[in-house]
Image (tube, rainbow, N blue to C red):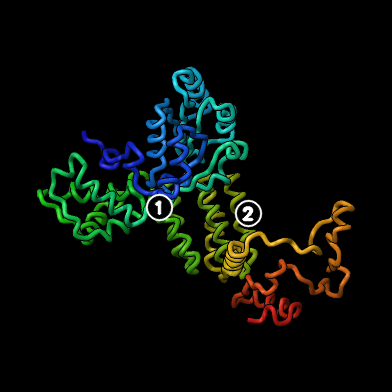
Amino acid sequence: MAQPLAERLRPKTLDEYIGQKHLVGTGAILRKMIDTGRVSSFILWGPPGVGKTTLARIIANKLETPFYTLSAVTSGVKDVRDVIERAKSNRFFSQSSPILFIDEIHRFSKSQQDSLLGAVETGTVTLIGATTENPSFEVIRPLLSRCQLYVLKSLEKEDLLELLQRAITTDTILKERDIILKETDAMLRFSGGDARKLLNILELVVEADSDEKVVITDEKVTERLQENPLAYDKDGEMHYDIISAFIKSIRGSDPDGALYWLARMIEGGEDPKFIARRLLISASEDIGLANPNALLLANAAFEAVMKIGWPEGRIPLAEVTVYLAASPKSNSAYEGIGNALEAVHQTGNLPVPLHLRNAPTKLMKDLGYGKDYKYAHVYKGNFVEQQFLPDGAEKYRFWYPQDNPAEAKLRERMEALWKERYKD
């Protein structure tokens, strides 16, 4: 039986690798490491199908070093220790440390991750971890501090089109067929920047056509995927589409839509922590100051889910989902921090005004640190007007309250304190 198309086309060298030019393009950081043969432990963070596993294999081939793989889903502490022992015994046959690749490293327990620390620290193995989740949530700090973190991006349209052309012209099976890519929008849309998903779709459409000449159109792709809605999603990657629909339903104030997508995730066996984290983000980003209680409730649900898991965890998740969807919406805090970050990027590291600096030593006091600072609590209403932004940035404005009752009160207070500054 032939391998799946995505496996047949898996790149074996960096020259065959598509995308991630910011990491492996000419002069990029990973490319330099690989070319010099000095690769340190790192974690690859990015969505499915963008080349994390492939990149790890290419590095191992390039360095000609032993390559071990572990799946966080099926491996235990004993498996980790066994691999490390084997790596020690092979250490002398290669100048480079053996590579230990751990897929879905975010699913490793704390004890499993702890068992890696010594081997990574001493260089017994070079760890390459792959994760679709933010490592700062799931990877323990001691391990994270010993690894570089590289972020992989969804493939661009040009990357995906290049991959399609390579598939129909170089694959041993597909090049025997007369395949014409008349339209590609549907394939690109359904793939969502996922190379594996794109190749699964192409293979599915070609296999369904018995004619020697296959003309691929948007209509044919859509029709085929509707007949086999999960056929192009063999690894459960649809959860990224569903979580997107879930969050957008909350943002759009539709409790029914949000509950439907929540049910889809529950039925699909999604990790409850994954859902709870997204609710925390939504409470901050989309509801925000319009209803600050939303973040408290989302955090309480996260803690509840951590304690009770499935199936009862569906209840606090549903409660928060409805509450967030039905709440008034504001992204003023989200926009505010975005505006502030943009100002920092533009202005650089402006010095802290002397009156705002801490003065723990006599020298610092003599230099004027903290001098002329006005302690708000000794003034009427616990407020006194003074400069809190750096010199040269005094006129910047980042936060703009939005039109909802909660922020109307905040706006009213800011206008009373700062007069014209907070009047739009």
Residue 79 position in % (x across, y down): 49, 25
Residue at image mark 2: 300
Q: Is residue 294 visible?
A: no
Q: Secondary structure at mark 2?
A: helix
- Classify residue 323 as left or right of residue 83: right
Give me the residue at 55% from left, 31% from top.
112
- The answer to whether the residues at label 2 and label 1 have Cβ atoms under 8 Å apart is no
Q: Amino acid at mark 2?
A: Ala
For marks 2 and 1 on the same chain, the one whose residue lies earlier in the sequence? 1
Look at the image and tell me in which quarter the N terminus lies.
top left
Residue 154: which numbered mark, if any?
1
Q: Amino acid at mark 1?
A: Ser
Q: Secondary structure at mark 1?
A: loop
Question: Dividing the picture into quarters, in which one does residue 351 lie?
Answer: bottom right
Mark whose residue sits in front, 2 or 1: 1
Q: CA distance from mark 2 to mark 1?
A: 33 Å
Residue 285 position in % (x across, y down): 56, 63
Give me the residue at 68% from left, 62% from top.
350
Label 1 neighbourhood size at 10 Å, few (<14), some (14-19), many (20+)?
some
Look at the image and tell me in which quarter the C terminus lies.
bottom right
Residue 24 position in % (x across, y down): 42, 44
- Classify residue 334 as left or right of residue 384: left
Question: Dividing the picture into quarters, in which one does residue 413 lie?
Answer: bottom right
In the image, residue 123 sits, relative to residue 13, either above or below, namely above
